[in-house]
Image: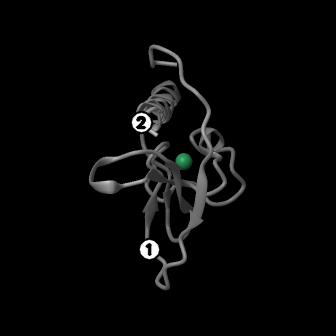
Amino acid sequence: MPINGELRGMQLRRMKNHSARPRTHMCSWCHHVYRSRGTAMFSTQVVGTDGRRRIGNYICQNLDCSIRIRNLASDPPTYLPETIELSHKVWRLQTNIGSFMARANLLADLL
Ligand SMILES: [Zn+2]
């Protein structure tokens, strides 16, 4: 993993996207693009600025990013395909997850 140091596990809260109008959504971690619904807000408790108590990302609602970057999901592939190599997609996914966890761990220490 391209993150130095130790990361701790955390509890995530999932809030599905219930918007009335289906819209295109992209996973913040793996960059899979859904033509309509497919992402959900995953957040964790922290102490943030301005009294904010949670931080989160819109990511694949089934947490199947690792499968999606390899095009192994049974439902339609990404709406906007990329031409980058799989190794770069893996690196990007690990970096995005590691960055979120590092930030959440740091802010959770303030609880
Ligand atoms: Zn994803």
* Residue 12, x across and y down, in percent: 60, 49
Query: Relative to the observer, which residue lies in front, 49 or 35?
Result: 49
- Dot 1 or dot 2: first in sequence order is 1
Q: Looking at the picture, which amino acid does disc 2 mark?
A: Leu
Extreme residue in the front direction: 111
Alpha-carbon span between mark 1 and mark 2: 36 Å
**Label 1 crowd bin: few (<14), some (14–19), many (20+), radius 10 Å:** few
Element under disc 2: loop
Furthest-left residue in this view: 50
Q: Which disc is residue 110 wearing?
A: 2
Residue at the limit of the structure toward the right, as seen here: 74
Q: Choose top left, top right, bottom left or bottom right for residue 102.
A: top left
Residue located at (69% from left, 44% from top): 72
Q: Measured from the top left, where is residue 108 in percent x and y?
A: 47, 37
Coloration mode: one colour
Most distant residue in the bottom direction: 20
Give the answer, above or below, for where 19 lies relative to 73. below
Residue 23's label in the rendered image is 1
Q: Residue at x 42, y 53 (%)?
A: 53
> Do tag 1 and tag 2 residues touch (Cβ < 8 Å)?
no
Mark 1, ligand 1, within 8 Å: the answer is no
Give the tally of numbered discs.
2
Local crowd size for mark 2, using a 10 Å CA cut-off: few (<14), some (14–19), many (≥20): few
Q: Tell me what residue is drawn at x 45 percent, y 47 percent.
A: 31
Name the spot of residue 9 as percent of width and height, x first.
Answer: 62, 32
Choose top left, top right, bottom left or bottom right for residue 65. Answer: top right
Which residue: 65% across, 46% down? 64
Q: Is residue 77 left or right of residue 93?
A: right
| Residue 15, image quadrant | bottom right
Question: Is label 1 in a helix, a strand or a loop?
Answer: loop
